[in-house]
Image (cartoon, grey):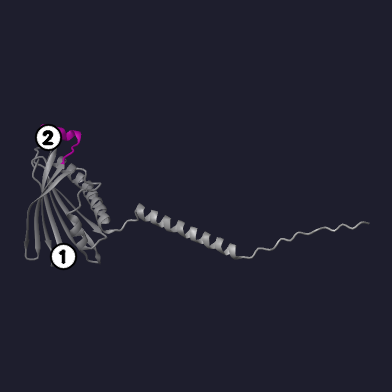
Amino acid sequence: MKFFTGDATFTFTWDQVVAAFWQRYPNPQSKHVLSEDVIERQVVGNLLITKRLISKTNSLPKWGERFVHGLQRHVYVVEESVVDLKNKTFVTYTRNIGLQKIMSIDEKCIYTQHPENAETTLCTRQAWVNSGVYGFSSVISSFGIQRFRKNAAKAVSGFEFVLNKLFVPETNSDSKVAAGSIKDKAKEYAKSKADTVKSKVPRPRMTSCQNNSSEL
């Protein structure tokens, strides 16, 4: 069995992170996620307890083809979570329920207010990877933990994308157009005022001069 642990800090409040968690799919890093369905949900005191079923694709390296020949290339993952509103903790547990003999991955994530900054959220992630393939258990587990490490980084990136989309105002094209329109109107107004001022300035009178030639 191989073990992984890592931390990530989100520059959003705990309430925002919990609210965004249920909307984190789709995102640019989640193309492998096919579907997500709520199986159970209940409120017990201050706790919100949820169980979901998530379907994901299961890409494999060439050497892994021999172990999954004839099997489906997607895997189902059970996600169980507990939101504690009183203590502001959010814990998720995930495990795959398909292809477990080849590789099983158990993950635990704990979301809490960052101890040094209450306006940010700390996520502590742990994972246990194991394989039941005789003679290849260590190799497959090592591969699994390395891939999990990369996927964890993608998961953080995808979640940050969703958080920014939900809670950070964007300077969209409409705003740029509006700003440009205001700028153009300001120029037009300045030009019209300048023309008005010019029109009020008295112009010098032009008089015709006659040259009286004297005979010498």
Q: Which mark is residue 116?
A: none
Q: From this view, report whether residue 22 is shown above or below residue 56.
A: below
Closer to the camera in the image, 17 or 154: 17
Q: Quadrant of the C terminus?
A: bottom right
Q: From this view, report whether residue 97 is shown above or below residue 118.
A: above
Quarter of the image for residue 15 reads: bottom left
- For disc 2, the marked residue is 67
Quarter of the image for residue 168 reads: bottom left
Look at the image and say whether residue 60 sits in the magenta stretch.
yes
Tell me the magenta residue range.
57-72
Q: Residues within 10 Å of mark 2 (few under 14, many from 20)?
A: few
User: Secondary structure under badge 1?
Assistant: loop
Q: Amino acid at mark 1?
A: Lys
Question: Residue 126 at x, y = what percent?
Answer: 16, 53
Q: CA distance from mark 1 to mark 2?
A: 43 Å
The answer to whether any part of residue 1 appears in the image is: no
Q: Amino acid at mark 2?
A: Phe
Q: Residue at x 80, y 58 (%)?
A: 210
